[in-house]
Amino acid sequence: MTPHQESQFLLQFGAPWSPWWLAVALPVVLLAGWWLYRGQFANLARRHRVTLLALRLGLLAALIFLLFRPSLLYRKILTYAGRVVVLLDNSASMTAKDTGYTDEEALLIARRLGREPATPLHNQAAIVNRIAAVVQEFGEFSRNADRRQDSFWNEAGRTKAKLAELFAQLEQPDLPTELFFTGNQDPGRRAYDEFADRAAASARQLLDRQAALDKQASAAGNIALREAANAIRSRTRLELLQEKLKQSPVAVSNQFVQTESLTGRSDLVGRLTELLQAESKFPLSGIVLFSDGRDLSGRAADVFTQEAARREVPICTAGIGSPREPVDLAVVSVVAPPFAVKDRPVRVKVFVKVALPEPTEVKLTVLKGTTPVAEKSLIPGTQPVTIEFTPAEVGMFRYTVRLDSVAGEIFSTQNNSADFALDVRDRKVWVLFMDWKPRWETRFALNILQRLDYVELNSIIGIVQADAKVPRGERKGAWPETLEAYDLIILGDLPPGTLTAAEEDALKTVVERAGKTVCHLGARAGVAQLQLTPAGRHHPLTRRLDLPVVPATNDTVLLADRTGALIEANFVGAGKTVEVRTDELWKLLNPTQLAAHTELYIGLVSWAMQATRGGPDLRAYKTSEPIQVWRTNATPARLVLTNLPADLVASVVVVEDDPELNFLARDNNFLETLATATGGGATDFSEYETSLRHIKPKQRVETYERRWRLWDSGVVLAVVALILTVEWVWRKWVGLV
């Protein structure tokens, strides 16, 4: 892309009087000079007389010219035409074949792609769309035109002639346009938009009539139509899109068209945000998105659409794919506990997507490597499937849930399985929990820990004990004499003296030497405006929180507010400590981020059992999650990795987490939200041209100027002095005074 360049040279005058006086003064002075000096040179030879008179008059003209303080101006004008970015979604879901298309939907696409001859009703709908386009084009002209000028009415006459020709081809013209060609004022954008809406509704009615006819013909056994529809259903979304763009490339008058692709995960909101914020001298006029609307960014589109609307960048969405799921089964997700106990059954929930023409029995299998450990025959429905198996070995293992494929599936293997990791132990995770009184955060934490099947919980509330004294002993509800059996110890806001000095020392020893984890739940009040740190963004305790991330000077801080750290995690000796310094997380998080608050305590158990100094936070990760590694005696102490280093491959299980093919139906709601919230239009890819009217051409003009002040220029004065010198020498040479 290169800007249009225009160069101009201008002569400007800085004298307080009008430069038009120069046109009067110059001939008067030259005539007076000729009259006065012609007698002095009468006795000289002709060549001397002409030369001296020319030099003298030239000096007079130069002096008069310089009195008007002239300046020579060079102006370079660069015009940057607007950009229309075409974003092509080429993610995995775009390789789907849409068996969900009905015959009439597929035939409509076939006709728009020119695969089938257009029917009269289809042609009528195309004419209506053309009428709407002509009116919109005239509206753009009319809004900036002066209706008092003949040029406006000449253009109006040409437009009316075009419309008359189009209306003559309609069987039932019912789209009045006289409003746009009468009166001394433009009727306004709303009138044009309402006309476009009426025209679109009229076109839809015509296409609905054609769809009804196609449905009847297919039901009657029209083989040719059925084959044409099957030909569309047999092509992938990308193939149909490429065919359309080959026939009709995106073009917007006087605007550059820039094509971009969406690669990898379908982060539509993220990619659109990048395009919107990309710096360029060529202004962004609009974005045309060709996609099935499957956005996996996990973010709401509100922030993006508000920014696009503020910048007046409409998003025109061209949806591709059927709004109904094609024939397909998919393992959408697997919910498994992070820990299990050897020789004890563990339950796994499997969420399955079912899009089958009729109920079909399939087999669900859980495999450890290639060895089946559990099987279940079922007729998939909308409820999650629970399957149970018993681990026979201790260690960190990768398991696979696999669903048998059925005939006619779009993807028979790519989305019929999912992996999960399981840390199998020889016993449950033992947790000791003690607080003086049942505070809100205490109740929440206890509620979560009690629900974890892999946790053996010993909880103590001091104030409810006899004489408000914490009992001791090797039983539940008592502070144990030895702490080595517990993997995680959580202590609340305890009054001084609750634990003896020996017990405090034992607590310190079990962390530093035995490698256990202690978590302190504080009672700080007045917390507001929670903020994550870079370490907290990826830490198991806080990574599910949706909060702004701010820099931190200490990598041990995970969560903070304006006054200081709220959650801090650290390695101490062979063990670990966690400080949760406030009792108000339930109040701040539960209304909007209950799941993330729950994950804080689940993540606490996992981090306590799996994190190691010099290693990662966890021993199981998903491919969508970065791996946070803590290094010893190194700067920086924390590394965030997307790929495992060789020395960690054996100790960490990374499971595939790609939901790209879980759901395949076109998400019309998402596409329409992007379009309507930004002033764009939402259409089917086969008629995307009708939405381009929402893109208004833009341009950016830059002007560069360079000025030479001739009246103050040393070069000009030197030239004047040279002429004066030559004239004086010449006079002396010919014998004049």
Image (cartoon, rainbow, N blue to C red):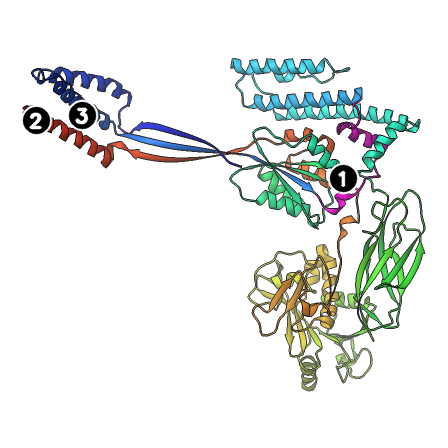
Do the residues bearing badges 3 and 2 touch, measured as CB atoms within 8 Å?
no
Helix, strand or loop under label 3: helix
Looking at numbered disc 3 in the image, what kind of residue is underneath it?
A: Leu
Quickly name the residue at label 1. 237
In this rendering, the label closer to the viewer, 2 or 1: 2
The answer to whether 707 appears left or right of 49 in the picture is: right
**Residue 37 is inside the magenta segment:** no
Residue 388 in percent (x, y) is at 89, 63
| Residue at point 15%, 23% (across, down) | 56
Give the structural element (helix, strand or loop) at label 2. Answer: helix
Q: Earlier in the sequence, mark 1 or mark 3?
A: 3
- Rendered position, 382 above or below 214: below
Q: Can residue 488 be seen here? A: yes
For the C terminus, which image quadrant?
Answer: top left
Quadrant of the rendered image containing residue 511: bottom right
Q: CA distance from mark 1 to mark 3?
A: 79 Å
Res. 522 image quadrant: bottom right
Q: Residues within 10 Å of mark 1 (few under 14, many from 20)?
A: many
| Alpha carbon distance from label 2 to label 1 | 93 Å
Q: Earlier in the sequence, mark 2 or mark 1?
A: 1
Q: Quadrant of residue 446?
A: bottom right
Q: Which three-letter amino acid code belongs to the residue tagged 1?
A: Arg
Q: Is residue 334 left or right of residue 503?
A: right
Find the magenta span and give its range.
Answer: 90-118
The residue that disc 2 covers is 733
Q: Looking at the picture, how far across and down is residue 654, in whole percent?
A: 74, 62
The residue at which mark 3 appears reads as 59
Work out whether residue 319 or residue 480 is closer to the camera in this orientation and state it. Answer: 319
Residue 526 visible in the current orientation: no
